[in-house]
Each structure stands twice: as structure tokens, then as C-alpha cells.
Image (cartoon, coloured by chain):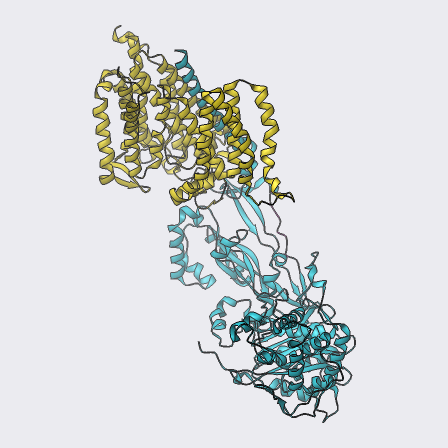
Chain colours: A cyan, B yellow
Amino acid sequence: MAFELKKKNILILGILGVALVIVLQLFNLQILDEEYKITASNNAFRYDIRYPARGIIYDRNGKILVGNETAYDIMITPYEVKDLDTADLCAIFGLEIEEVRATLAEYRKYRRRIGYQTLPFVKQISPAQYSVFLEKAYKFQGFSAVSRTIRSYPYNACGNLLGYISEVDTSYIRKNPEYKRGDYVGRTGIEQSYETILRGVKGYNIFLRDVHNKIKSNFAEGKYDKEAVPGKNITASIDAELQQYVESLMVNKVGSVVAIEPSTGEILTLVSSPGLEVSKLATINKHYSEIVNDPYKPMFNRAVMSPYPPGSVFKLVNGLIALQEGVIDTVMTYPCNMGYKVGRGIACHAHPSPTNLTSSIMMSCNAYYANAFRRIIDNPAYPNVTAAFESWKEYVESFGFGLKLGSDLPGEQGGVLPSTKTYDRIHGKNRWKSLSIISLSIGQGEIGTTPLHLANLAATLANRGYFYTPHIIKGAEDTTLNSDFSQRHYTKVDTSNFRKVIHGMYLAVNSEPGSGATARIAAVPGLDICGKTGTAQNPHGKDHSVFICFAPKDNPKVAVAAYIENAGFGATWAAPIASLLVERYLKGKVERTDLEAYVISGNLIQNVPIPKR
Amino acid sequence: MIAGQLYRKLDWPLIITWFALVMIGWISVFASVYDEEHAHILDISQRYGMQFIWIITSLIIASFILFVINPKLYNVLAWILYFMSMLLLFAVIFVGVEVNGSKSWFMIGPVRVQPAELAKITTSFALASMMSAYNFRLKRFSSLVKVGLVIVVPMLLIILEKETGSALVFASFLFVLYREGLSGWYLTFGILAILLFVVTLAFSSFTSMILLFVLMVVAKTAFSKRYLHNIVFLAAYLPVLILSPRVGELKFIPWALKDVEWLAVFMTVPLLYFMYKAIREKTRYMKYILLSFFVSTALIFSVQFFFDEVLQDHQRARIENLLGVTEDLQGAGYNVHQSKIAIGSGGFFGKGFLKGTQTKFNFVPEQSTDFIFCTVGEEWGFAGSLVVVGLFVFMLIRILTLAERQKDNFTRIYGYALASVIFMHFFINIGMTIGIMPVIGIPLPFVSYGGSSLWAFTIFLFVFIRLDLERWK
């Protein structure tokens, strides 16, 4: 009997144990845990969201690039809607009555899920419509208005850099649960890169409902309310005036122009043409299909996303490497008789021969760089071609080529740099030599660089051997930016070798007529521009026109790369555009008005083959 | 003893407890679906009006059971009733109406009846009848199989109706078997398995193994009674086990093992020692403990497999949500979150009758049936919740106490079955509303809205109250 009693008591202990667990949890929920009394999903509270103003984006001189305007969102609490005059409501906001009826039917269908939630009904109505709504608000039970800020763009420039804001969609919310329906988020450009700084923090007012679901009062006299914290303003490194000027030069041309301040890595101007018009950003949804269907892809930021063959401007890099490796010096010369005749050979244009380092840069001699490149790759200091090539590649990568530079521009691409594996695949292992890859000597072949890479090369040359990661943001209110942007990145080439190459670049622009210098069109008296032209061969059509430069020669203030698609010689279009930029930036005005008029009127877009869709 | 005197022995504490719970249920149903346009509590167009009808009919049924039906019939008819109810369980799969995805309801005119409710009673009859027979010995294997079949058949049929929650209730008959002589090891091991399952999923197999080791040493201590010896061992060796994965971080250790593998390495030594002692000293309990240890280890490592491969998506979601592995307040966690808000917002004394805001307007789904406890928690607060929990605990202990006083084994076993079923409903239902059990849709006995459930539990209880009278004859 004792045994049986014991079993009964064990079971009773079990019951008491379970009851204790339940009571403890009840105690926890009902007495200890405050969370369940003032939680956002507590249905007795109505949370009215207060949206913060988004941060303003200034240019480097304090001009507003992106500002704010007030607009209103009309909100609906479906449960509270009673005796709605749908026709009147539609008249105020200019809505289709059928659509509104369908939406309301939808709300009725999901009413259990929606409960007492307040949902956005019409977005971004103007202050004028809002005042009409206010007058009649008593007629529209269950509707309310929330003030929102929408973006305004006082300066007609930088369409591709700023990005836009749009309402978050379901898939975005799933990935970023801190966003709620009705929130806006920056897409592309600065708006996306600096979203966390710009967006600010939402606040709310808490109101209490009674049993009849009427709003009774501000809960606890606003003790738990939260003020919205406005987003922080940021200053872009862009010079809005300069940007606007270059955009006007690039009308009817396809390509990119990038200007960097070499001493900081700050991007002064970054144009991708054709680009987005600023006027379309605020209402991008309306224009979206038009933009997407444009064959020239205005959303595509060529300056950071498009890998192009660099062409002759890449000779500068090969020259620097050859100097550093000690396989050439400044007095060595190579003959050129309309090209380099070994193997398949590389053609060249007519110019005085032979050339040394300086004159080869000045006149852009292909034969010189074919020789120099072969000496790098066939350098007996390395055990084999592969090792020499790997060493060459390390040099090239130290300039940032083939890698993402790590700028704050969304979508930045790393370009293309061939590896030994690439050539093993093409030619077979140990079946290739310097002559097989000779195109690289003049920046053709298996290499792709973005205009940003080329501008960075110009800045590296200006700094005589190092660069700062290019970036588009100068600073933000009480926030420290990526410290990596203030770090110097040194190339593997010594400063002394840079000086030798820069001498050639100086002469390419500033030589006497008849000297054979390729970039004389870029010369501006007093500015000491140093530059290098490029004409990138293009199997799909006319050659691309390329030019990089920096100025002045001593203490450079600006480094530029211009890459114009299907525009022919580097000197014809890219050099004038880049030099006009430099003139405008350094002198504040352009005196070469004939050249300016020639550039603006130039229509090169017709040369660009439209890709078949 | 003549009839009039016999009825003076009626167990009024149980009847009053029953009545109190039913009244609390009625008031709560009223509060949870209260609607000003139908403000009268007797308005039968509303659930509270209907509940009043169920309560009146329940009273009639209860009187019928107390005063009309001969209690000897239950034992005599036990098997016939059992087989009839199995037939109904089977039939409902084909002719039942579908409610919330399960086909477990008969539609008889305006009334919905769930045969699973009935089956709990008839299974209790069958169990009581079988186990109270003279020649029945639970220790016998064939008997155990028979008892198992009586329990498992309705469970399987109910699972076929996709009414898994109700099927789970039948597992509570294990308590009856325990009382009637089943070794406590089964029960202990069952609870241990659930504990390890939860810990493994909520934390990791590493934590689970440590817990298992501690439990093993505690069990060893309890049996060997060498307290100091074992406590010192545990205090010294537990830190070693917890820190065992850190060994892999030492420079001169070349092996890269997982945390659990390091743990296994360090557990081997004491385990080998325990095994050696168990064999040498021929201690029976130590063999059981070690056996449990190894079976549990296998369990821990098959839990993940079971969880990933056997359970269905929504079940997995509910369990993960309960354990806090995932938090999904819109999907699987919605009901529980709303329910916790409702109960939590009640505070100590609650918001007062009809003053609840959370349980109005369908924020909490099924608020008059499965989630009725939310209304109690919100409007009557911690104090009111304590009253309900207290009434259930009192009722359960009272039933067990009465059951132990029986001369007739049939009544005792039936009483235990009754208590087990009420306990399971009480624990799972309240547990799910406060977020300590997964969401399993079974009603709170006597309190939840619904005729089928109220009738069934009233019959279940009053048959016991009537049977209890027999001991005075």
C-alpha cells in the first residue's frame, strides 16, 4: 500500500510542478515583463509614425544637390472607414474610382489580417491637395495624413551619382526587417551608399484606444513617445558647377569623364553619358520603363561599371614597369618604321624615328612599347615567362587595375586583368611567350579598365606614385567616414621613375607644332597640363577616343580621364573635353570658346552601334 | 443504504469546482465575443447565448448520470462503447466535415460533435475494464501489448483525421499505467527524452550532452546515497567538461575536433570508470543509468534528423518558434505573440470585466475556444489566472485522492484516466497561451466555448462522481 501511495504522491508532485511552471510564467508575463504592456503590437495602442527628414546632400562648395520638399501620404485605417463617399475622395486625389473600389474590397477581404493597422492609401500628394483634403477630412472617417519628405533637385546635374529613393517592397523588407511598409530607401548612387547616414530614425506618438476602439488620449502624456531624428546631411566631393559643365560637353556622346583631386582622392566630377536626367529622379517610378528601354542604358554608370580596353594610355604603366625593372632607361632608343615588325607585328603611325622614352610617350610610338614589353616579359632575371608575367601583373595591380578600387560608388567593377591561367587556356601551358601577348604593351587585348581606373592612374601619376581610393563623399555631419579613404596606396614603382614618364606627358601636350606630339590640342597656356592620348581599337565599330591628364605639372590640382566611345583618335574628342574640364576648373572660365563650341555641337552618338535586344 | 442517504455522500467539492469553472468559462466567452448590439448574455444568436444552452443541457446530462443510469453498466458496456466509438472515429474520416484542416467533426443538424472527445471517455472505460480484471497483470508482456493497443488505436485514427493535438492527449494514459504498476523508468525516460529534445534544439547537442552527464551523476548520487563523494566529483569535473573544447585552441594540440567531440573525449574516462564499477560491484541501478545514458546520447544525435526529416513544416515552425530559435511574429508565432500580449497586458488585477482590448475584435484567433485563457488573463489579471489554475489543481488532486479511496479497481483506474486527460488539456492549453508549449489546438476543459467539449468533459467527470458513490454501498 505504501508503494501505491508513493506513486500517487509523485503524480501529485508532477501536477504541482506543472502548475508552478505555469504560475511562474504568468507572473513573468503579467507582473515582471513590461514589454507586453507597451509593445508595438499591443493592439490597445495606436502608433502614429513620425517620419524623419532625410539628410541633405551638398556639393563641395555648399550648393544643395539634393534637398527636401514636403508632401503628404494619405493613410487609411480600414476598420474605421464608415459611410465613405468614394467619388468625392477620388475627385480630391484624382484617382480612378474602380481602382479604389478594388483596393477597398481587398482590405475587406484581408480584414482579419489587417486588424487595426493603418496602411498607406495614396502617396506623395501635394500640399495643395492636402489642404483640400483637410477641409473635407470630417467626411472621411478612417483616413488621416502623414507628412513625408520627398526629394528635390535644385541643381540639374549628377543624375547618375545621386541615386533615388523609393518605397521598400516586400522582398526588400524580408531581407531588411528593420524597414517597414511605407518606408523609403535609397537606391543606387549616394542615396544607397550612405543610406544609414541619410535616413535618420523614425519616431512615433502612442495613442491609447478604449474598448470601443476609439482613440482616447496620448498614452502616459507622451512619456513613451519618440521624436523622429532627422537624417544627417552629407557633403559630396562633387563640384556641381563643373559636373554640370562637363555634362553639357557630353551631350550626344557616349562615354565617361572622371576628374579626381589627386591630393585627396575626392571625385570632382563623374559623368556617364547618356545619363539620368535629374528631373526624372523624384518620380522615377513613372519613368522607369522609359529609362529601362532606352538602348543607351542611362542607368548604367559606365564610369565605374564598364570595362574598356585602355589603349595607348596604358603605355605609361608599361613604361613605368620597364623603368622599375631596369630593362630600359631614358637614353635607350628603338627604331619605328610604321610599326613593330616581329611576329604578327603592331602597326604604328608616321612619326620621327627612333624614339626614346620621352619621345615615345610624346608621340605614342607603338614599336617602343612592343620592345619594352618584350624586355619585361623575357627578362632573364626571371626563371620563365610565367614568372615574369606574374611580376608584371603584380605591378599592374598595384595601380588598382583588375581590382575594385573600393570607392563608395555602388556597382563599381574591377575590370579585367588576364592571368597566366587565361593564357594557358588560350595557348596551352608553356606554349605562350612575350610575343603572344604583345597587345598588352599598348593596352589592348585581354585587359579591361573602367574610366575610374584611368582617372585613378592620372591621379597616381600626378602624385608621382601613390593614390587615395577615389570617393564621392567629403564628409557627413558628426560621422567619421571610412578611414581607408585617407590612406595612401603606393604603387610598386619609385617616384623617380614617375618623373621621367611625366616629362613625356608634359611634352605630349606642350611641344612645338611639328614635333609629332599627340595631344597639343589639350594645351592651355599657363596650366602646364600633362597628358597622354589613347585610341582604343574596337572590333565593334569606330575606335574609342581616350585621354588622361593632370594639371598643373607641379602641385597638381586635378586629374582627369575621358573615354568617348566610337569617337576616333584620342586627340579628336577625349583630349579637348578633358582639357576644357581642366581649364574650367583651374581658371573658372573657358577662353577657348571655339573649341568649346566644337565639342558641344559634336554628335557622336550616331557612331555607337545599338546593341540588338 | 437507501438512495436518499447515498446521495448525501455526493462529492460536493468536485461538483462546485466543476460549476465554478463552467461559470468562469461562460463569463469569459461572453467577454471574448461581446458585442454591444447583442448585449444580453442569453442572446442565443451569439456564442455566449449558445454556451448557456450547452451549460443547461450539461446539467441535465449530469443529473441523468447521477440519478438515472446504473453505474454498473459502465464496466459491462465498456467494450461495446469502446468499439462503437472507434467505429465513429473511423467513419468521421469519410463523412466528417472539415474544420480548420482536420476532418474530425460530425454535423448533426446544427450541432457539431467530435467523436474524439467521446473516445477519451470510452477508452478510459476500456482501460479500466481491462486492467481491473482479476487475471490482469501489467508486468506481463502480452498484457502490456493489449493495453498499448487500446490506447494506440484511437490515437492512430485521430492522427488520420489530422487532429494531432487530440491524439497527443491519449499519451497521458501513460500516467494511468504508471499508477497501475508500470515501472517509473518508462515515465522518467519519456520525460528525459522530451527534455533532451528541447535542449538539443534550443541550444546545442553540446549543452544537451553536458545536461545528460549532470543528470547521470545526480541519479547515481540519489541511488548510491554517497552525496559528498559525488558532489565533489561533479564540482571538479563539470568545469573540465564545459571547457573541454578550449583544449583544441592550445598551440601544441594538432587535432581539430568539434566541440562535441572534445566533450566525448573527456567523458570517456569517467564513463569507463562507471562501467568498470557497475560490472565489478554488480549494481543494478548503475546499469540502468548507463543504459539510459547511451540511449539518450543516441537520441540527442538523432533529434536533428528527426526534426529535419520526420516533422512537417508547420510543426517544425511551431516548435522552432516556441524554443525561440526563430521569431516569426506574422506567421507561426502570431497567435502566441498576440496571446502573450493579451495575458501580459492584464497585470495583477486585470483590466476588469469587458474592459479587455486585446481579446476583442479577433486579435487573438480562436479566442472563445482554444485561446479562452487569454480573456481570463487580460480581464482578471494574475489574480484571476491564479484562481483558474488553482481550481484545476484542486480538481485534479481531488480526483486522485478519491480514486485512491476506491475499493473497486475499475473506479480507481477510471479516475486516474480522467485526471490524466484533464491534466493534459490543462497543461497544453494554458501552456500554449503563455508560450511554454507549442500551439496545439485543444480546448480548456469546462471553460472553452463548445457543446461537444463541454458535454464530453461533464459526462467524463460526472460518471466518476457517480461511480465514487458506489463505495458507500
Q: Which residues are magenta?
A: A224-231
* Figure check: B139 above or below A578: above
Asked whether B60 or A184 is in front, the reply is: A184
**Residue A261 placement (x, y as % from top left):** 71, 71
* B432 inside magenta stretch: no
Give the residue furthest to the bottom: A514
The quadrant of the rendering that contains the N terminus of chain B is top left
**Residue A129 placement (x, y as % from top left):** 52, 62
Asked whether B84 or A371 is in front, the reply is: A371
* A226 inside magenta stretch: yes
The answer, for residue B356, to whether it is visible in the render is no
| Residue A220, image quadrant | top right
Asked whether A466 or A373 is in front, the reply is: A373
Asked whether B157 or B14 is in front, the reply is: B157
* Figure check: B226 above or below A373: above
| Residue B296, image quadrant | top left
**Residue A442 placement (x, y as % from top left):** 62, 81
Residue that appears at 43% across and 43% down:
B317
Left or right side of A73 for A484: right
* Figure check: A36 above or below B235: below
* Tally of numbered discs: 0
